[in-house]
């Protein structure tokens, strides 16, 4: 998504929309790495916390980054109201990942 934005969208989007797109890409990347950490913990006996973290990160990416992508591509600003739900899912994921790591 980052390469698509940098090469395909930069000349087509307003600077404010490009910033929103870049935020979506950044959070998607951070939480893709967090998903790898959750999978690593799950494979090493991380228990239910690591599984919860993984699902929370997936939901967070879909809601947070997904709503921002849709906002930029459709211009429907009401989609920004969905974004905080993804942020809450990210918080749940990080808390579950930390709990899983400490219990390991």
Image (spheres, grey):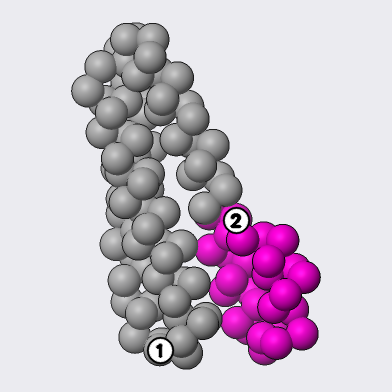
Q: Identify the residue at image location x=31%, y=51%.
A: 59
Residue 76 marker: 1
Provide residue 52's location: percent of width, then percent of height. Answer: 26, 33
Q: How many marks?
A: 2
- In the picture, measured across the screen, residue 78 lies left or right of residue 3, that is left
**Residue 2 image-quadrant placement:** bottom right
Question: Which comes before the other along the chain, label 2 or label 1?
Answer: 2
For the magenta stretch, what is the residue range? 1-27
26 or 8, which lies in front?
8
| Percent of width and height locating residue 35 | 44, 35
Rendered residue at 44%/76% (across/down): 70
Identify whether 100 is placed above or below 93.
Answer: above
Task: Look at the image and tell me in which quarter the N terminus lies.
Answer: bottom right
Residue at 35% x, 62% y: name it.
63
Eyeballing the image, is 101 above or below 92? above
Q: Which mark is residue 26?
A: 2
Residue 5 position (above or below residue 25)? below
- Mark 1 crowdedness (10 Å alpha carbons): few <14, some 14-19, many ≥20: few
**Mark 2 Cα shell of 10 Å, populated few (<14), some (14-19), many (≥20):** some
């Amino acid at each position: 998504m980052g390469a698509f934005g940098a090469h395909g969208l930069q000349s087509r989007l307003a600077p404010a929309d490009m910033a929103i797109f870049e935020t979506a890409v950044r959070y998607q990347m951070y939480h893709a790495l967090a998903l790898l950490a959750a999978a690593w913990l799950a494979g090493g006996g991380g228990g239910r916390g690591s599984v919860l973290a993984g699902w929370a990160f997936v939901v967070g990416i879909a809601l947070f980054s997904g709503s921002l992508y849709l906002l930029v591509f459709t211009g429907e600003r009401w989609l920004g109201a969905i974004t905080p739900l993804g942020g809450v899912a990210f918080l749940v994921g990080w808390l579950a990942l930390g709990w899983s790591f400490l219990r390991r």
